[in-house]
Image (cartoon, rainbow, N blue to C red):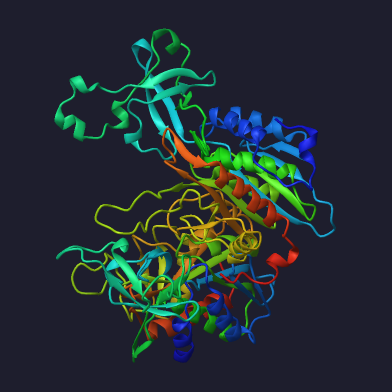
Amino acid sequence: MTNKLEMSAGKLPEIGASQIALLEKLCNATAVSGDEHEVRQIVLEAVKLIADEVKVDALGNVLATKFGRSDKRVRVMLAAHMDEIGLMVVKKHEDGVFEFVRVGGIDERQLPGKPVLVGREHLPGVIGAKPIHLTTAAERKNKIDESAMRIDLGPEIGEKVKPGDRATFATRFELLGPSIRAKALDDRFGVATLIELLKHAPDQIDLLAAFTVQEEVGLRGARVAAYALDPDMAIAVDATPAYDLPPWDDEDENDRYNTRLDAGPAIYVMDFGTIPDRRLVNWLVETATQDEIPYQLRQPGGGGTDAGAIHKVRSGIPSVSVSVPVRYAHTAASIARLDDWANTLRLLHAALGRVTPNLLVGERRG
Amino acid sequence: MKSLIQKLVETPGPSGFEYAIRDVIREAIADAADEIRVDALGSLIARVGTKTDEGMRVMVSAHIDEIGLMVTHVDANGFVRFTNIGGINPLTCYGGRVLFMDGTQGVIGMDVIGPGKMPKLSDLFIDVGATSKDDCPVKVGDVCGFERPFLDLGKRMVAKSMDDRIAAAVAIEALRRLEHTPHEVHFVFSTQEEVGLRGATTAAYGVDPEVGFAVDVTRSGDTPRFSPKMATALGDGPAIKVRDSSFIADPRLVDWMIKAAQAADIPYQLEVLEAGGTDGRAIQLTRSGVPAGCVSIVCRYVHSPSEMVDSDDVENAVKLLVKLLSEPIILG
């Protein structure tokens, strides 16, 4: 995926065919929280030629460092999580039928009838659903509990599956004109973005890229990664829901959109886990304004990123989050725009180029 | 002390935006502290004393943030939708007034939701007197606190942010009155408690204490009907916490605190709080673990714009804290 020609630090990063191919490979890989092996291998392959130091820690995080060249370098941690929400097989029944549980935040209603890929071999199966011929009107009004659902792989393929195996939605990456349809854009967008930023890291910072594990089950990887890296500041790069659909029937304005597609990278002012240091929020907003990069402020509220764990590590680490807006996050297929991703990369690259020790001089003022 | 309390409770400082209240406290303790610093999350940390053979490194934590609101959306007509910073009860919002960090004021209105229904936060909006999105002085991400003047009822005092400015006042006063201590005491005026003890978490790591005390408010069990199932009452003295839903106070420390109160003839009560947490948890769980306790000031109507405490409880809390910090801490 990488070649020496792409590694010149002065060149502006952009989203071209090779970046999209890498994102496709990342999205189609299976890396349900706790078994991030497949994405980790892709990341290790991509960063081995660009980073100055690469290590895999005890929880499976990939920590890739690109050292700057100036004297007073700010240590900037960038975090993107490799794991995705998914399913775990828990009990085998006859004929290749399995009980399962969800890993991370998945709405049960999203599951019946969806094709899945099980285990490291990506064995094809389906979450079975009772056909309409056999359901009653009352049944069709009720949600089906996870405990009543099964993954069906058939008898032969089912022999290869065992409790503990992970499964993901079978959705394959597709380009739809200016859009992407894929599973796991949360947070393969972040992973692909960090790889590009490592290639184009500015000289006045040490770029500490953490490709983290187990974000979807409680920001677990980021916590230990931040402890090890002990950075001066941190940015979580993630994907966040866009709910920019028309307003409800009885309302004339959508005031709960979270973020909108085509409006650029979403800068966080508060989520469930973090109240970002406003010096960092302002630094991103000023960079976007000066460089005429579209951006949006994500509506403050719930949800969270790796920043929620990072900022509380040791004596505290000033942190902020930036996300690519994504419709239908945590379902079988999300829709996002290539331009929003490209502008996220542009914003982060431009902002990193402006980091100086003065950015965090003095006290936090909000 | 009441003028200090008034200044503390009327200064806005929702979680994450504690810079103004931090400046007020820094000025109040400047002459009495040996060293003052601010950590990455904005907590003010003031050291008093040096450790003797009989002493320990002690952390005392009172949080300086308060609950507040953050703007999520400004609509075409200039009405402002918001989300909560910390635990906001929608019931206490309607008709309330808010003060933004830049001085902008507003009132809280409510959508028509039908009779007998409880509002949700999404049913409420702030009206700052704007007529459209263009002339609205606030934008997404702006922060406000509730606005309500300090009310002095003599023996009882009322304010929007007794939680936890009254504890900040107790800590400030104890810091000033502490003449002799065998300990190296770190008074932490912590941030972001209301959103998850975040400031105390990083401050505790930085201070690396050998023992720690939170100072916070707790609920009262002395109001008419259906009051919380608690033995605490206004005027019965500072409460020595046995447990709350975030941590169990070190029982050795609880016993020692009780003996200290008895020895100094300071009234006290014991507190078991079923729903609520304090910085004590953050201290207890830092690094390799730390014995931690909590001195509480009993408070009625917690997380409403009118939180009530008793003046004698406040004075006795100062006396108890000074007593605790003035002698060696014996952990049974």
Residue at point 65%, 28% (across, down): A41
Q: Is residue B244 above or below residue A215?
A: below
Q: Is residue B231 above or below residue A193?
A: below
Residue at point 31%, 61% (across, down): B122
| Rendering coords of residue B256 (x, y %) | 49, 68
**As rendered, which of B276 and A221 lies closer to the eye?**
A221
Total number of numbered discs in the rendering: 0
User: Could you tell whether A302 is left or right of A8 in the image?
Assistant: left
Residue at point 35%, 56% (across, down): A254
| Rendering coords of residue B26 (x, y %) | 60, 81
| Rendering coords of residue A137 (x, y %) | 15, 30
Residue B265 showing in the rendered view: no
User: Could you tell whether A335 is left or right of A56 in the image?
Assistant: left
**As rendered, which of A224 and B111 lies closer to the eye?**
B111
Q: Quadrant of the C terminus of chain A?
A: bottom right
Q: Quadrant of the N terminus of chain A?
A: top right
Residue at point 41%, 36% (across, down): A331
- As drawn, the residue found furthest toward the top would be A156
Q: Residue A279: which quarter of the image?
A: bottom right
Q: Residue B90: which quarter of the image?
A: bottom left
**As rendered, which of B176 and B328 lies closer to the eye?**
B176
- As drawn, the residue found furthest toward the front would be A177
**As rendered, which of A320 and B272 lies closer to the eye?**
A320
Residue A142 showing in the rendered view: yes
Q: Is residue A70 above or below residue A83?
A: below
| Rendering coords of residue B15 (x, y %) | 48, 68
